[in-house]
Amino acid sequence: MASRRYRWSEAKRLLTAGMMALLVTGCGNGEQGDAKLIEYQRALAEALGQPAPERTAPPNIGAFPERDERLFEVADTREGILNVYALRDCHITQLVAARNNQLGRVAPPSQQWIYELELWRRLHACWHSDVPDSLSDANRERLERLTLIKTEQLPKVSWNSLFDSDEWVRSFSRASSPCHRTTRAASRHSSRPSRGCTKPPSTSSIQSGSTTRPS
């Protein structure tokens, strides 16, 4: 009985020491951390009277899906400047203009989602107001069509804004050393590539497209 109590007491001591060692070396040198883990497992197995665990290579996680595999296709929605201005009572003119300026074209996915959400809100509110009664038949049809398109696209845009973000990709992509300081420093100083493209001045893009996500 005394021997059993001693073994459990020794096991608890080793368990505490091992956890502290892992916490200290968790984000440090990988080889040093592995050596401490092996020594901890050996000492713990010896204290419990059990064979030491065998070292085996763990199966690697799958690669994070490529961009065209994880995103929905969202078609561009284009309208002429005069057509957008005809719907000025819906208060979308400045919003669309901001989306088509230089900063709007290279906005990150999260900002694109905010734009799409606000555009849908304004179109939806406008369609359910008295504004359509004051529009011509063509502009009323245009307002209805844009509202339906944005209503259908919003769930896909919401998905894309999440799964196309750099934060999501970096968090779930494989890395040989997640806590390596060099890798983290490099990611902080990396520049984001421009996603914009030059559009003809005669039209305004109301929606930016994305790549295909197969069903």
Image: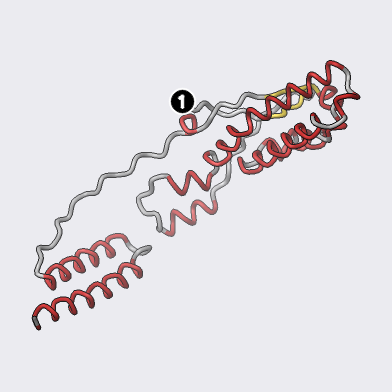
Place of residue 148 in the rendered image (x, y in percent of width and height, measured from the top left): 70, 25
Residue extending farthest right: 134
Image x and y of residue 131, in percent: 87, 29
Instruction: Give residue 188's position: percent from left, percent from top.
Output: 53, 54
Which residue is at the front of the view, 21 or 12?
Answer: 12
Q: In the rendered structure, which amino acid carries the disc numbered 1?
A: Ser
Left or right: where does residue 46 sit relative to residue 72? left
Q: Secondary structure at mark 1?
A: loop
Q: Place residue 93 in its image quadrant.
A: top right
Give the vertical position of 157 relative to 80 (above or below).
below
Residue that extends furthest to the top in the rendered view of this protein: 138
Quadrant containing the N terminus in the rendered view? bottom left
* Left or right: residue 30 compared with residue 43: right
Q: Position of residue 28 (x, y in %)?
A: 36, 64
Query: What residue is shown at x 40% (from left), y 58% (from top)?
Result: 179
> Residue 133 lies in what quarter of the image?
top right
From the viewer's side, name the closer residue of 176 and 169.
Answer: 169
Q: Which residue sits at x=14%, y=56%? A: 54
In front: 24, or 120?
Answer: 120
Numbered disc total: 1
Residue at the (52%, 26%) spot, across then down: 212
Q: Quadrant of residue 199?
A: top right
**Mark 1 neighbour density, 10 Å: few (under 14) some (14–19) many (20 or more):** few
For label 1, the residue is: 215
Q: Residue at x 19, y 68 (%)?
A: 39
